Image (tube, grey):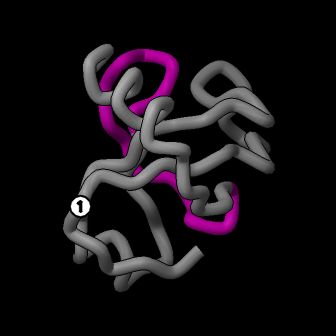
């Protein structure tokens, strides 16, 4: 996953190797823009702890949520 977007994006986890307590496979996560992380093939994600942490970007696939779903995610944060 390579994105340098500065807007909030959503990703689905496809791998949680080394992070089983922090990431759930097939779960949608909100990202936090971090251009420095992208340069190092990492992504900043709000994980199960509710905090944002860096993870390998290849653990995720960028998805586009339908507008109604994105609004629910936005209101919940």
Q: Quick check: is 47 in the magenta stretch?
A: yes
- Left or right placement of residue 44 versus residue 6 in this view: right
Find residue 49 and report its image quarter: top left
Identify which residue, 25 or 55, lies in the foreground: 25
Q: Which residues are magenta?
A: 46-59
Disc 1 packing (10 Å; few <14; some 14–19; many ≥20): few
Q: Residue at x 24, y 75 (%)?
A: 35
Q: Is residue 27 above or below residue 55?
A: above
Q: Position of residue 73 (x, y in %)?
A: 39, 26
Residue 25: horizontal and vertical position, in percent? 78, 34
**Secondary element at tag 1:** loop
* Image quadrant in which you'd find residue 66: top right
In the displayed structure, 65 sits above or below 46; it is below
Q: Nearer the viewer, residue 18 or 66?
A: 66
- Quarter of the rendering occupied by the N terminus: bottom right
Q: Is residue 68 left or right of residue 22?
A: left
Total tally of numbered discs in the picture:
1
Question: Quick check: is 70 in the magenta stretch?
Answer: no
Question: Where residue 26 sits: x, y (%)?
Answer: 78, 35
Residue located at (37% from left, 41% from top): 53
Give x and y (percent) for residue 11: 57, 50
| 45 w.r.t. 25: above or below | below
Q: In the image, what residue occupies the spot 60% across and 57% down?
A: 63
Residue at the spot 67% in from the left edge and 61% down from the top edge: 61
Q: Is residue 72 left or right of residue 69?
A: left
View extreme (front): residue = 68
Residue occupied by mark 1: 7
Residue 43 vs 65, above or below: the answer is: below
Q: Quadrant of the C terminus?
A: top left
Asked where in the image residue 24 lies, by quadrant, the reply is top right
């Amino acid at each position: 996953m390579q994105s340098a977007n500065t807007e909030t994006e959503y990703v689905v986890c496809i791998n949680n190797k080394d992070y089983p307590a922090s990431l759930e496979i097939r779960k949608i996560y909100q990202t936090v823009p971090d251009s420095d992380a992208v340069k190092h093939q990492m992504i900043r994600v709000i994980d199960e702890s509710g905090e944002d942490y860096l993870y390998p970007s290849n653990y995720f696939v960028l998805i586009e949520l339908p507008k109604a779903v994105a609004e629910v995610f936005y209101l919940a944060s």
